[in-house]
Image (spheres, helix red, strand yellow):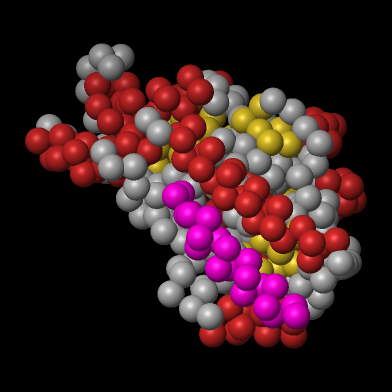
Amino acid sequence: MIPFNKPPVTGAEEQYIKQALASNKLSGDGPFGKKCQSWFETNLPAKKTLLTPSCTAALELAAVLIDIQPGDEVIMPSYTFVSTANAFVLRGAKIVFVDIRPDTMNIDERLIEAAITPKTRAIVPVHYAGVACEMDAIMAIAERHNLYVVEDAAQGMMSSYKGRALGTIGHLGAFSFHETKNYTSGGEGGLLIINDQRFAERAEVIREKGTNRSQFFRGMVDKYQWVDIGSSYLPSELQAAFLWAQLEHANEINESRLNAWQYYWQHLQPLAEQGRIELATIPEGCTHNAHMFYLKTSGLDERTALLDHLKSRDILAVFHYVPLHSARAGAAFGRLHGEDSFTTHESERLVRLPMWFGIDETTQQQVVNAIFEFYR
């Protein structure tokens, strides 16, 4: 069976985990955690970054930082993972879903302004497949209406928009290091990216269960105490050690995935030119990270048949999100503004092909051959 994904491993993970175990500092913010955060602050760059146990935790932390209150509204696409919405629903917000663009599967920036009401507090663009939303337009809308922008860049590490790293353009951003992402911290993991200095100090407090513990360890206070609301958003040092082994090879991993993405693109281009399938669009000014390679079929029935055909050839390809506004919880905690012109239809056409760091051309050729076989 050709799997859909294999978690990235560079070879140094075990060594660094052993070093972390020997340090007697496992609860987080140890040497590996600090090195990871410093790497991101330098390479993105960002004013401040904080590792979290997951991207979900990073988004929840962001929702607290921008002070989401019951009754506030938050605008986002429906075509995203549940964590994007849950982080704000947990604070009592009502989610306002906006339709997507069919070319990138990202939120349609032209529809955002019409969805704004006096209750709107934030816009949460999701950079699908590591391809940037139209951030200039989104930031301009936010500025006009005095709104926060929280970038869900779960899939966006090493991607950029007009030369700026995804996650560093809005007031706050979030990365995921889940095992299905380009980089992992051992199965789960995340990063909060702070681009507005106003949030830096409070983010540390909320992440440390509402205490000023980080200030205490820096010698800024003589004892630490409970000073704000918070939760346990600190990852273990073992997660950081695993991630550090990946950051040391960040460019190598990125190049490998881009080469694999380009292989699929070139070899499936004939089917696209015949109008049998559609391939992803990378807008001008966007540099993507080959987080996934997807194609689009003519519709749901054809997609189901293609997935079944690939499975019969021992190839595991998958579809992706069921739009949140069509889910039971989505109806309870949110509403769709305007028409669902593309979200549902485009989501029912999409097929994600096997992709991982180190996938070889022989494996990719098997996938391509099976797809051509189906369309013959």
Q: Is residue 99 visible?
A: no
Please say if 210 is above or below 364. above
Residue visible at 24% across and 21% down in the picture: 217
Q: Is residue 85 left or right of residue 140?
A: left
Q: Nearer the viewer, residue 128 or 318?
A: 318
Give the camera-side residue of 305 and 76: 305
Q: Position of residue 185 (x, y in %)?
A: 36, 45
Looking at the image, the residue that sits furthest to the top is 219
Pick the quarter of the image with the N terminus. bottom left
In the depicted structure, whether residue 13 falls above or below residue 96: above
Bounds of the magenta segment: 356-376
**Residue 265 x, y percent position in the rendering:** 70, 54
- Residue 80 pos. (x, y %): 64, 60
Nearest the camera: 253 or 68?
253
Tally the numbered discs.
Answer: 0
Q: Can the viewer see residue 350 in this picture?
A: yes
297 left or right, relative to 42? right
Q: State which quarter of the image contains the C terminus.
A: bottom right
Which of 48/101 is in front? Answer: 101
Question: Magenta-highlighted stretch: main secondary structure?
Answer: helix
Residue 68 higher or lower than 351, as above or below:
above
Is residue 375 within the magenta segment?
yes
Q: Residue at x 70, y 73 (%)?
A: 372
Q: Is residue 13 magenta?
A: no
Residue at 66%, 52% (x, y): give it.
Answer: 128
Q: In screen coordinates, is 62 left or right of 246? A: right
Q: Vertical placement of 50 versus 223: above or below?
A: below
What residue is shown at x 9% (from left), y 35% (from top)? 22
Locate residue 297, reporting x and y percent.
Answer: 76, 72
